[in-house]
Every structure is written in C-alpha cells, then in structure tokens.
Amino acid sequence: MKKALQLESIATWLPTASKPVIISGPCSAETEEQMIATAKQIAATGKVHALRAGIWKPRTRPGQYEGAGAEGLKWLVQAKKETALPITTEVANAAHVDACLKAGVDILWVGARTTVNPFSVQEIADALKGVDIPVMVKNPVNPDLELWIGALERLNKAGVTKLAAIHRGFSSFEKGPFRNAPMWDLSIELKTLIPELDIICDPSHIAGNRDLIGMISQKALDLDMAGLMIESHINPDAAWSDAKQQITPSVLAKLVSGLVVRTVSSDNKNFKDTLSILREQIDHLDDEIMQKLAQRMKISEQIGQYKKENNVTILQVNRWEEIISTRLSLGKAMGLNEAFTNELLKLIHHESIQVQTKIMNQAEARV
Ligand code: PEP
Ligand code: MN
C-alpha cells in the first residue's frame, strides 16, 4: 500500500544539485586541519553539492574514535565558510539537533544506529517541530523496511517535509564481500511505496572497502537513485574511522566522472531493446555469482583456519568426491553441460585450496 507523506524533493532544498546529487566528506571530522583541507580539495573537484562529516560518531564498539563533538562542529562550519558548500552531519539526539541548529548546519542526517530506535527518532522529531531543515534518514542497521518508513513518518509528522532516505546497506549474519549487504530490493520497495521520496545511496558504508565503491555507485544510479554520499578524506589510510572505505578527493572526482547517468524516461523505456533488457539480466546475475563466489571463498578461509587449528590436511579426498558428484548431478538436472560444470568446479576447488593454503602458511597473528 502506498504511504502518504508530505515531501519536498532534493531539487527544492539543494538547488545547486544536479542528478546525481553528490555529498562527500570525511567519515569523521578529526582535526581542524584535516577537515578544512579535505573540504577544500573536495570543493575544488567541482563535483560535490554538499559536504559531510561525522561530529558525534556512534561506534559499534567502545574505544573507537567517537568524534570531536561541539569543537568539530566549528570546523565543519568553517569548512562551509571556506568552500561555500552546504554542510551536513549526523544527529542522534535532541542535544545534537540543538547544537547543529545553533551552529548553522544546513542538512541533518539520522544514522543507521539511530533509525533502529523509535524513541531516539521521536526525540529528534520533537526537537525539529517548527524548524525548517532538511533531514536524511539512513536505513536501520537491520533489514526492516517498516522501521525505515516509521522514522520518515515520525519526522514528517513533526512537520519536516524536506526529507530523503539514505540506503547504506544492512548488517547481515552472512558475511559477503560487502561490509553491509546492499539488499537493493528494500530500497526498490521503499521507492515503490513512497515514489516521491528521493533515495541517496551510501556506497562507502555498503562497501566497507574503497575498491568496491565505484561499482556500487553505478549500480545505485542504474536503480535510479537520486544521488550518492561518498566518504572522502585527504589521507584515507590515516583516517581515525572507516579508513579502508575512504578515498581521496581526487579519486572521488575520477569516480564521479566515470559514472554513467542513464535516463529512465518513458521514451527511453520504449527504446530499450530486447538485447539491452537481456544484458541487464545477465549483469544482475553476474553480480550475484561474484558475490556468492566471494562469500564461498570467505568460508574457505574459515575452514582453512579451522583445519590449521586442528592440524587437519587441506585436501580431504572424500569431501571433494562428494562435492563433485552432488554438484554434477545437480547441474545436470538443471540442464548444465557436464564438462562445463566439471571445469567450473575444478577452478573453484583450486582457488579454495589456494585460499586455505595461504591461511595455513600464515604466521599466527598476535592480538
Ligand atoms: C557515517 O555516515 O559515517 C555512519 C556512521 O554511517 P551509518 O550510520 O550508515 O553507519
Ligand atoms: Mn563512516
């Protein structure tokens, strides 16, 4: 069932933004120098419409960098003065909202660890009654669409109409190639239920690894998302939070330039020929095959670790024979050529052995 929300699109509250809207900045504001230098380089790319930085960092485990707090907010405001870019940061409670409103933050966002909690979301909504400021709501950590919509509704009921959603992926027990499983279907479902809601993708938190950001960004655009929020830092490897997933402003500029923006006008749909529809299906399936393969190799790593700890040989002939015979008959039943299945299994097995050998030969890491 469609949900009725009173919404104003991003184009109305970020008028300089084109499609896709690009929001970028460091995961965290760390020092004044890091914040300003990063902001200047980002602005110089000419590809970014708003500057982000985490000031209060909700960390899964204590002891990690928890943000610069009120002091950091001053650096973010200074970055705005020096770049003329609108600024955005994460708020998790009413005190954060008040501090941001006083400091002149342009756009707020609610983080994934806050969206899960209706009490916190309501506290933020109450603090925003009568205030005209755009708010972006990240999906909750867990794949619960109702919780995501609920947060948007709470804010909308408080009078916030400048709303967008941010898709940052979901925690999943199954460890795949991504830090957070994208579960694209949930965003598609959100867009179906609230068609006028703009959705921005956060490929950095989905990927957890800088090499996958480009591919996820393209996928998000192909799903007609309104924009991207990408973490960027002058010195990513030295970042105090989310170091592996941050990219330099110059890499960001290249990444954004390389994105293909496709239109989804009804005209275009008419022109879409059978070949491109079939190719899209193949792309989608290949995506899944790669994800599953990466997932399979991760499990091989765990098996390698287990075998190492228990002094078991890598190759277990019986297990390999069982794999070959069950998969071959499964493949056959599915109409796959037997020789092809055989070759494919050999390749996968070979790689799996390599992965396990690497683990076996690794010196014990000291923790
Ligand atoms: C962030 O944007 O740095 C952040 C903490 O994100 P999330 O709430 O998606 O984990
Ligand atoms: Mn981050």
Image: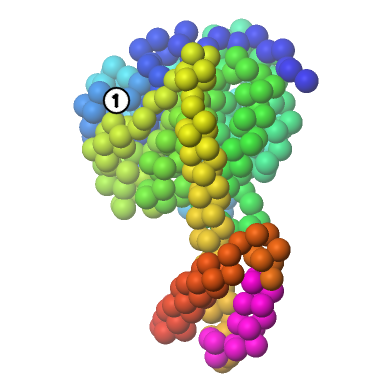
What secondary structure is found at the residue carrying circle 1? loop
In terms of secondary structure, what is the magenta stretch mainly? helix
Q: Position of residue 78 (x, y in %)?
A: 30, 24
Query: Does 307 sit left or right of 83 as displayed?
Result: right
Viewer-proximal residue, 19 or 138? 19
Q: Is 293 located above or below residue 326 in the figure?
A: above
Q: Is 357 located above or below residue 181 in the figure?
A: below
Viewer-proximal residue, 276 or 288? 276
Specify the segment rendered in magenta: 313-328
- Image point 52% across, 37% down: which residue? 278
Q: Quadrant of residue 232?
A: top left
Query: Does 97 sit left or right of 237 as displayed?
Result: right
- Image point 71% across, 63% down: which residue? 333
Q: Is 356 located above or below residue 115 in the figure?
A: below
Residue extending farthest right: 1
Q: Residues within 10 Å of mark 1 (few under 14, many from 20)?
A: many
Tell me the amino acid under the disc marked 1.
Lys
- Image point 40% across, 19% down: which residue? 19
Viewer-proximal residue, 138 or 20? 20
Any magenta on residue 314? yes
Viewer-proximal residue, 325 or 230? 325
Any magenta on residue 357? no
Q: Quadrant of residue 261?
A: top left
Q: For ligand 1, tell me if the residue under mark 1 lies within 8 Å.
A: no
Q: Position of residue 168 (x, y in %)?
A: 54, 38
Q: Which residue is mark 1?
A: 47
- Image point 50% across, 55% down: which residue? 290
Q: In this view of the protein, can residue 313 be seen by the observer?
A: yes
Q: Position of residue 152 (x, y in %)?
A: 66, 22
Q: The N terminus appears in which quarter of the rendering? A: top right
